[in-house]
Image (spheres, grey):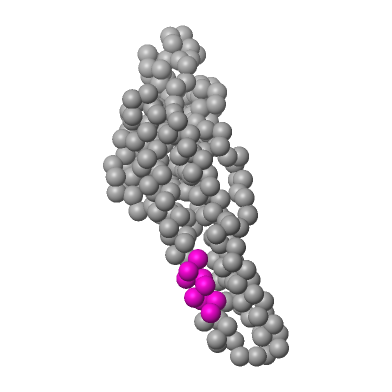
Amino acid sequence: MNEDTGAFPCAVKIQMAEPHISNNPPLVCWSCHERSLGTHFCSSCGKLVQLAPNIDYFAMLEMPRKLWVEADALERKFLQLSWKLHPDKYASATEQERELSLRHSSELNDAYRTLRDPIARVEYLLSLEGMRKEGETKQQAPAELLEEVFELNESLDELREARAAGGDLAGLKARLQDAEKSFQGKLGAVDAALQSGAREWDAALDAPGGAPDVRKKLLERMNELLNRRAYLRNLTLNVAKELAA
Ligand SMILES: [Zn+2]
């Protein structure tokens, strides 16, 4: 888990079991041979089903591809499903069912680990929508920050030099702390912008026809915000590290 957990203090209710659940074509149940609509269990006979190929994390948690998720509701859903899918429950079942239970459980854990983190959730959605490769961040300074970043780097150099020369560090450190605070403020603004992007995304999904043009623009905007966030975070971590040295 990274430190980003809880970056969105979300208070809006999650809407489970709604439209926009990722659609997977019905599979034929290995046990009763009916076409099954369930993600985890056959809608006909109730047995564990084969996981659909390319099933995504949202579908694993039986939720729509929405970004505004209430942490408690998500946890409840996860616990409920993991209890139902738990390998202990299949200890005396057939080998096939034991294997299915292991697969479902492990995928469910991965899904929960990703979706409970608001930033990872946005990143994941962007990768699902083809906007972002997993783990990809651009470390390019946003143009309007160039000057401030340049000054910051100068201050960092001065601090290192003063440290090496045994000079007075207090004034330099105070300047860096101010700079760090300023960048932290920008980071907060990025998180706020991501939050409103998340709400707009959910609203677009609910709009008639799913507002594809609006969603495309939102994906682009959120992608830029994530890049900016990664850049700012890296910057503030570097300053913190230098101040603590
Ligand atoms: Zn069945």
Position above or below: 112 against 170: above
Q: Which residues are magenta?
A: 175-183
Residue 133 drawn at (x, y percent): 60, 39
Name the residue at 60% across, 45% down: 135
Residue 95 drawn at (x, y percent): 54, 23
- From this viewpoint, is residue 24 visible? yes
Q: Nearer the viewer, residue 72 or 11?
A: 11
Residue 226 drawn at (x, y percent): 52, 49
Q: Is residue 180 magenta?
A: yes
Quadrant in the rendering for residue 215? top left
Q: Is residue 233 magenta?
A: no
> Would residue 113 be found to the left or right of residue 11 on screen?
right
Position above or below: 147 against 21: below
Name the residue at 49% across, 44% down: 221
> Would residue 71 be found to the left or right of residue 142 on screen?
left
- From this viewpoint, is residue 57 visible? no
Position above or below: 34 against 142: above
Name the residue at 56% across, 62% down: 145
Q: Nearer the viewer, residue 25 or 203?
A: 203
Can you say which quadrant of the picture contains the C terminus? bottom right
Q: Nearer the viewer, residue 62 or 135?
A: 135
Name the residue at 60% across, 49% down: 137
Position above or below: 52 against 136: above
Quadrant in the rendering for residue 200? top left
Residue 51 drawn at (x, y percent): 51, 24
Q: Nearer the viewer, residue 202 or 43?
A: 202
